[in-house]
Image: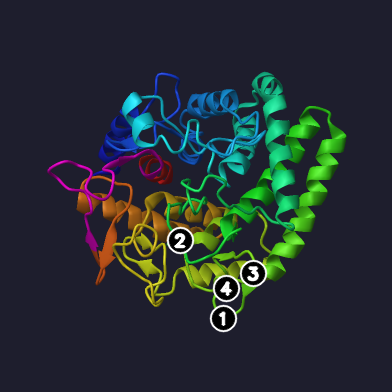
Amino acid sequence: MKIEQVRGRLLEDLDRLRSPEGYLYAGSPRYHTLFGRDALISGWQTLARDPSIARATLHTLAELQGKQTNALREEEPGKILHEHRSDPASQAELSHWGFPYFGSVDSTPLFLILAGRYLRRTGDTAFLHDLWPNLTAAYGWIKMTEDAGGGYLRYERKNPYGLFHQGWKDGSQDHLRIRPPVAIVEAQGYAYSAYREFSVLARQQDAMDFAIEAELRALSLQRRFNEDFWVQSKGFALGLDGAGLPRNVPTSNPGHLLFTGILRADRISPLVDRLFEEDLWTPFGIRTHSASAPDFDPFGYHTGSVWPHDNWLIAEGLRATGHRDEANRVRGALLRAYERLGRIPEFYAVVDDEIVDLVDPANGSARANPLQAWAIAGLLELL
């Protein structure tokens, strides 16, 4: 299939996920609603092609930003939501939550990251000026959460029926085998990047006290992180548990650090090399979880399958750090997956170097969503 044909089909798929407000629904047929993390990342992925998606995403999430402390919804002032459902069926099914539901540790730093990138892309200072109170509230939440977490962004559910894990590999059970409060690795990189972006935004608003404070917090976080999360035998830990002990298992999560700038210079090449070792790398992308780990499952939702958006974030970091050959390997792997499956779904399995489609052709949603915004937009951006 020609690249232009692939682009055209990806654009058609994205149009099917565009909300009336202009942001992208997370997926279809499941998750056909607003997810903070998903919408922010897909808004970033489409920024060069259509910045109105990022603008609509920021505007909508700002309107729904946390304003009070509510344990049922896991809401806190300044926090950006995890998920919002407004249809009666979903609200009845998930009545033990309450909506908007805020069980996400990383949607708030991603909100600041997208705001900074949107400004650089568009120069839309008027919009960012209107958004400034929401940006300062998000910054305040990150500061508060980092301080309460002993210097790291940590999560621990406030609602006993809420999500147990609240990074991108979220879930209601402890499938990551880390006891809370959890400092998941990629969220620390996001926090660093958010501080740096907020510092730039604050300078644009002539708020120099905020700008200097955010820059200092970024530098302090960077120093701590490169010591506490580095596990020499396996690179970076997946996370630190409530006692500060590392979960020492190779995963794709540290690959997200590459785009953030948090890495010490001597940590970059070892991390890149680790991502392409045979227990993580496949002909169709980087696995979520090492094939050498005792709990590896090639079909596991977050414990061995391959997620296109995960690979896109890694590729973004590879490009940012000058590893263009490696980024092209990831691009080629995702394109190969598209050609084999005829789509780029939410995730898929790789067994003996062969791709396994986890979408049920009968109903389109057995295990993996056939349409997932950040998978589609990620491949589109790479092409």
Q: CA distance from mark 4 to mark 2?
A: 22 Å
Q: CA distance from mark 4 to mark 3?
A: 8 Å
Q: Is residue 255 visible?
A: yes
- Classify mark 4: residues with Cα within 10 Å, few (<14), some (14-19) or many (20+): many
Mark 4 against mark 2, which lies toward the viewer?
2
Q: Residue 28 appears at what percent x and percent y?
A: 29, 36
In the displayed orientation, state which residue is furthest to the right: 209
Q: Amino acid at mark 2?
A: Asp
Residue 265 highlighted magenta (yes or no): no
> Residue at coordinates 71% horizontally, 70% vertically from top-left?
227
Q: CA distance from mark 2 to mark 1?
A: 24 Å
Helix or strand or loop: what does disc 1 sit on? Answer: loop
> Residue at coordinates 52% horizontally, 30% vertically from top-left?
54
Is 276 rendered above or below residue 66?
Answer: below
Q: Judge from the rendering whether residue 81 lies leftward or rightward of residue 353; answer left or right.
A: right
- What residue did someone put label 1 on? 233
> Residue at coordinates 40% horizontally, 19% vertically from top-left?
20
Residue 372 highlighted magenta (yes or no): yes
Please report the bounds of the magenta region as a residue range: 355-375
Q: Judge from the rendering whether residue 70 lies leftward or rightward of residue 136; answer left or right.
A: left
Q: Tell me whether circle 4 and circle 1 mark residues in contact (CB < 8 Å).
A: no
First in sequence: mark 4 or mark 3? Answer: 4
Q: CA distance from mark 4 to mark 1?
A: 6 Å
- Classify mark 1: residues with Cα within 10 Å, few (<14), some (14-19) or many (20+): few
Disc number for residue 267: 3
Is 292 rendered above or below residue 67?
Answer: below
Q: Nearer the viewer, residue 10 or 300?
A: 300
Q: Amino acid at mark 4?
A: Gly
Q: Tell me whether circle 2 and circle 1 mark residues in contact (CB < 8 Å).
A: no
Helix or strand or loop: what does disc 4 sit on? Answer: strand
